[in-house]
Image: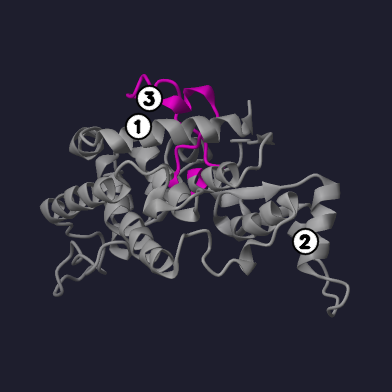
């Protein structure tokens, strides 16, 4: 997992001070997914930098041998042609995309058999795709902009280096996801087309991003209303895990108008507080 921010964070009431919730959206999304699926007593460690993770991305799943053997068997059933276990699987390490398979195995269920993916109907399932795109696009861009950014020439040229210590104090989503890949349409580069230098940086229209963000948060609040889970689902869905990750990171780590926009929506604040308690209880300290 990417670590929580240190206790010297500008947000003194940050719930990450107890060392349970990651400060990175991607890691926190998987923490919430595990907790909201009902898996508990999970331990987390913060001493692995993204550069040392499988596929260069956190989080990774590290299982006891008995659980790893079960997952390896599930991934490679005896009736199918045997494939040699990968080196990381031999070490009981797995990348994040295998977390749902492990959760299913732990709970003795097959979530893939549910064509509705936990949503109440097909329309809600299809609608969830749009909300995921909104959160991972507009809201993610606003979250990145609200956090301190490196301003050195090397970083502007895309040649900056983050030490493991720096990786521990920053959100991985902040350092590894360029705004150019999130915003649509992509912003123009800082350098002109006639420049002798290669294209670098991005001319971000902050007013436009902020305007879209305000609309996104207002729509998110309206869609939640007084429901227990998004889209009126009877139980938590992957969308709830993703929404919690963004709302928590905004409330705990974002600054200025980005954070204020969420605090103005009482239902979002109350929902994040309730779900935060559920997620915390699933992880051992």
The picture places residue 28, in percent across and down from the top left corner, at 49, 43
Q: Residue at x 81, y 49 (%)?
A: 67
Looking at the rendered structure, which numbered label has been put on residue 270? Answer: 1
Q: Are marks 1 and 2 in contact (CB under 8 Å)?
A: no
- Camera-nearest residue between 134 and 2: 134
Q: What is the secondary structure assignment of the residue under circle 2?
A: helix
Which is more N-terminal, label 2 or label 1?
2
Q: What is the secondary structure assignment of the residue under circle 3?
A: loop
Q: What is the secondary structure assignment of the residue under circle 1?
A: helix
- CA distance for labels 1 and 2: 44 Å
Please, is residue 212 above or below residue 113 in the view? above
Q: Residue at x 69, y 34 (%)?
A: 41
Q: Are marks 3 and 1 in contact (CB under 8 Å)?
A: no
Residue indicated by mark 3: 9
- CA distance for labels 3 and 2: 38 Å
The picture places residue 183, in percent across and down from the top left corner, at 26, 62
> Is 111 positioned to the left or the right of 249 in the image?
right
Is residue 267 visible in the rendered image? The answer is yes
Q: Which contiguous range is marked in magenta?
A: 1-28
Quick one: which residue is furthest to the right in this view?
A: 78
Residue indicated by mark 2: 87
Q: Quadrant of the N terminus?
A: top right
> Is 244 positioned to the left or the right of 20 in the image?
left
Within-10-Å neighbours for mark 3: few <14, some 14–19, many 20+:
some
Within-10-Å neighbours for mark 1: few <14, some 14–19, many 20+:
few
- Camera-nearest residue between 129 and 222: 222
Which is more N-terminal, label 1 or label 3?
3
Q: Residue at x 67, y 35 (%)?
A: 43
- Camera-nearest residue between 33 and 69: 33
């Amino acid at each position: 997992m990417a670590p929580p921010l240190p206790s010297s964070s500008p947000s003194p009431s940050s719930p990450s001070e107890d060392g349970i919730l990651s400060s990175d959206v991607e890691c926190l999304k998987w923490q919430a997914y595990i907790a909201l699926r009902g898996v508990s007593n999970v331990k987390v460690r913060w001493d692995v930098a993204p550069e040392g993770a499988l596929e260069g991305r956190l989080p990774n799943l590290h299982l006891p041998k008995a659980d790893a053997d079960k997952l390896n068997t599930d991934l490679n059933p005896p009736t199918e042609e045997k494939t040699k276990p990968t080196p990381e699987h031999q070490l009981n390490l797995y990348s994040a995309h295998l977390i749902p398979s492990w959760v299913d195995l732990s709970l003795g269920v097959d979530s893939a058999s549910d064509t509705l993916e936990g949503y109440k109907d097909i329309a809600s399932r299809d609608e969830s795709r749009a909300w995921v795109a909104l959160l991972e696009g507009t809201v993610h861009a606003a979250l990145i902009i609200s956090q301190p950014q490196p301003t050195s020439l090397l970083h502007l040229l895309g040649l900056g280096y983050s030490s493991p210590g720096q990786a521990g104090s920053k959100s991985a989503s902040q350092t590894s996801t360029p705004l150019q890949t999130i915003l649509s349409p992509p912003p123009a580069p800082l350098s002109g087309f006639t420049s002798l230098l290669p294209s670098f940086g991005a001319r971000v229209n902050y007013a436009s991003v902020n305007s879209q963000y305000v609309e996104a948060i207002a729509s998110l609040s309206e869609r939640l209303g007084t429901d227990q889970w998004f889209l009126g689902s009877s139980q938590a869905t992957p969308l709830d895990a993703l929404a919690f990750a963004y709302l928590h990171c905004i409330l705990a780590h974002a600054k200025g108008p980005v954070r204020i926009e969420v605090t103005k929506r009482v239902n979002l604040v109350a929902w994040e507080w309730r779900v935060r308690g559920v997620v915390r209880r699933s992880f051992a300290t």
